C-alpha cells in the first residue's frame, strides 16, 4: 500500500463532502442537525485533518495520539475546541480552510514510506488493536463519509 492508496479514499470522501456542503444554502449550512450544524462539521474536519498529522507523528514515535484521551467523551472536548477555533460562519472561508488542511495532510502522508504507513510501532488503540498511520487516516475517511451521509439524510427529511 502506497501513500497514494491511503490518500485516494480520503480524497474521494473529502470531495464528496465538499460538493455536498457547496450545495447547501447558507441557511442550511447554519441549521442544526442533531445539535451540530454543517458549519460545525466543517470546522470539526478542519481540526481533525491537522490532528491526524500530529497523531501520525506520535504513532511513528511509538506514542499514543493525544486524542485517545478524549475517546471516553466521544471526542466532545476536542470537537468543541475545533468548532470554536474555526469560528467563521462563512461557507467559502471554512471550505478554503478545509481544503488547505487537506492539502497539508495529503502532502504529509506522501512524505511517508509505505513501511511507515503500515508499521506497528507498539501503539495500541483504545479498542485493543495496533494503531497505525493507515488506520487513523482510514478512520478520518470514515468520518468524512459518515458526515456526508448524515447531512444527506437530514436533507431528505426536510
Image (cartoon, rainbow, N blue to C red):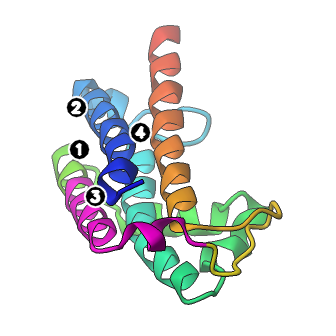
Pick the residue in front: 95 or 110. Answer: 110
Residue beneath disc 3: 102
Structural distance between the alpha carbons of marks 3 and 4? 18 Å
Of labels 1 and 3, the one closer to you? 3
Callout 2 crowding tier (Cα within 10 Å): few <14, some 14–19, many ≥20? few
* Rendered location of residue 137, percent (x, y): 48, 57
Marks 2,1: beta carbons within 8 A: yes
Residue beneath disc 4: 38
Above or below: residue 33 compared with residue 44: above
Marks 3,2: beta carbons within 8 A: no
Q: Is residue 146 visible?
A: yes
Residue beneath disc 2: 22
From the viewer's perspective, is 106 left or right of 51?
left
Mark sitting earlier along the chain (3/2): 2
Mark sitting earlier along the chain (1/4): 4
Q: Is residue 32 visible?
A: no
Q: Where is residue 17, by image quadrant?
A: top left
Main secondary structure found in the magenta portion: helix
Structural distance between the alpha carbons of marks 2 and 1? 8 Å
Query: Which disc, if any, is residue 19?
Result: none
Mark sitting earlier along the chain (4/2): 2
Callout 4 crowding tier (Cα within 10 Å): few <14, some 14–19, many ≥20? many
Residue beneath disc 1: 91
Callout 3 crowding tier (Cα within 10 Å): few <14, some 14–19, many ≥20? many
Of labels 2 and 1, the one closer to you? 2
Amino acid at each position: 500500500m502506497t501513500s497514494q492508496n491511503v490518500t485516494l479514499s480520503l480524497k474521494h470522501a473529502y470531495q464528496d463532502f465538499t460538493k455536498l456542503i457547496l450545495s447547501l444554502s447558507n441557511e442550511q449550512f447554519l441549521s442544526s442537525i442533531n445539535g451540530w450544524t454543517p458549519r460545525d462539521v466543517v470546522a470539526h474536519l478542519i481540526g481533525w485533518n491537522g490532528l491526524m498529522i500530529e497523531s501520525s507523528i506520535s504513532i511513528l514515535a511509538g506514542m499514543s495520539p493525544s486524542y485517545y484521551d478524549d475517546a471516553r467523551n466521544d471526542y466532545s472536548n476536542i470537537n468543541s475546541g475545533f468548532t470554536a477555533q474555526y469560528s467563521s460562519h462563512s461557507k467559502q472561508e471554512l471550505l478554503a480552510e478545509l481544503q488547505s488542511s487537506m492539502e497539508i495532510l495529503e502532502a504529509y502522508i506522501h512524505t511517508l514510506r509505505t513501511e511507515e504507513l503500515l508499521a506497528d510501532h507498539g501503539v495500541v488503540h483504545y479498542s485493543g488493536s495496533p494503531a497505525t498511520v493507515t488506520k487513523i487516516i482510514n478512520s478520518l475517511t470514515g468520518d468524512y463519509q459518515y458526515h456526508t451521509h448524515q447531512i444527506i439524510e437530514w436533507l431528505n427529511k426536510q
